[in-house]
Image: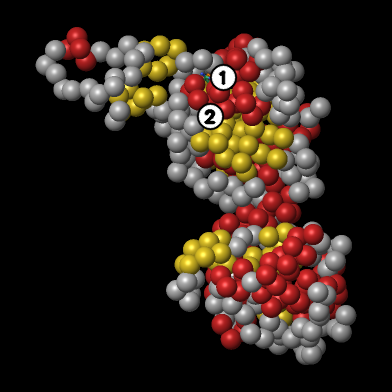
Amino acid sequence: MSSKSILTDKHIILGVTGSIAAYKACALASRLTQHGALVDVIMTESATRFVAPLTFQALTGRPVYTTMWQTDASGGLGTHIAHVSLAHEADLLLIAPITANMMAKIAHGLADDLLSVTALASANRCPILIAPAMDVGMYENPVTLANVDILRSRGVRFAGPGSGRMASGLEGLGRFIEPDEIAGHCRRVLGMNGSLAGRRVVVTAGPTREPLDPVRYLTNYSSGKQGFAIAQAAVDAGAVVTLITGPVSLPTPIGVERVDVLDTRSMLDAVLVHATGDDPTDALIMAAAVADFRPEEIAERKIKKTQDPASMQIDLTYNPDILYEVSRQTRKPLLTVGFAAESDDLIAHAQEKLARKSLDMIVANDITAGDAGFAVDTNRVVFVMSEGIEELPLMSKEEVAQRIVAWVAEHQM
Ligand code: C5P
């Protein structure tokens, strides 16, 4: 189920310059288009030596501009002032990949091709995000680094570069980062003035893992998808996000500070550090499926198979309840949202938890439904608040995340 995101209906100008990484800009254009963005591509002359304009046109279904001098549909602009209007209408000017040459031009205000003209005309009209791609020697040349400083000081935002192997065979800084990461940077930049701009949000996600011996542990089926989607939705709304997560295999949303933990007690420590104390967070959203109990003793050595049934017993003890511990702190988050995964009496159990854990809202879901809850991509939840409940229809976890973040933004203090 595809859902709307911060990228949907956004007008992005994608500038592509002459780097071998231009081929990766095709995947980027495709990804942004799949998210519903309207992507108009401007290619420099040298970029067209690496990739054909037709490739971008086919991927975006929109015009591709390659020159200032033609005023027809074959790569030119409709009118002589269209280069200015391109920048006026855009929500974001993304240049990916950007060469050292184009960075130098933009840093010094040169405007001798359609892309540099558009960048110059975009000042104060739309944010500029650049993803450098060049050989390590070019990137680390003092003249390029000075241009990086100039661009940063003027508010240009950077996506990378990364470090690693280059087409030349050399290794180092200057590598074009992956298209998905660049799309994540676009989200961060587009969301920066959103409904949670400047607010701090701590999100927990995933399962916790309770060790039994050096090779075994107790855990649950949580995939972390819902919590990660909430962290992304909070970034999209402009929040400063810390994501405290148990062991999951999901990429970290761009712009999120990720704190990895294993067991419940270390998740509690991390939550207390990041959400409470002298400078408590604005909102804490506890989406983690925290293990309620753990083996009373962790065996130092691997437990051996034995014929004696009595020695096969595992004694369990309760873990601390993180939300309850947070509620007992003197300085706590302004808003706290919990989750309740239930298999019966959904609303009644959620209401009881709302009160016991001193929550502002609880997101309740029935884990017996096959299309909602653990490890699937959709969820059907009920928002339970002291003033009443709101039942949401079946929707993607991304949409559930957006609804939770919207609720937080509406109720922020
Ligand atoms: O009591 P129950 O585990 O159903 O509560 C679920 C909510 O409480 C979730 O938000 C979960 O992250 C949180 N929780 C917690 N500490 C625990 C268990 C659950 O904070 N030990």
Say which of marks 1 and 2 sits in front.
1
Mark 1 or mark 2, earlier in chain = 2
Residue of label 1: 322
Within 10 angstroms of label 2, few (less than 14), some, or many (20 or more) residues?
A: many
Give SS at disc 1.
helix
Q: Nearer the viewer, residue 4 or 76?
A: 76
Q: Is residue 16 visible?
A: no
Number of numbered tags placed on the structure image: 2
Q: CA distance from mark 1 to mark 2?
A: 10 Å
Please give the name of the residue rendered at 60% of the width and 19% of the height, measured from the top-left corner. Answer: 323
Cβ(mark 1) to ligand 1 < 8 Å? Answer: yes
Question: Where does ligand 1 appear, by image quarter?
Answer: top right
Query: Are dots 1 and 2 in contact, CB under 8 Å?
Result: yes
- In the image, residue 7 sits, relative to residue 342, either above or below, namely below
Q: Quadrant of residue 128?
A: bottom right
Q: Is residue 265 visible?
A: yes
Residue of label 2: 288
Give SS at disc 2.
loop
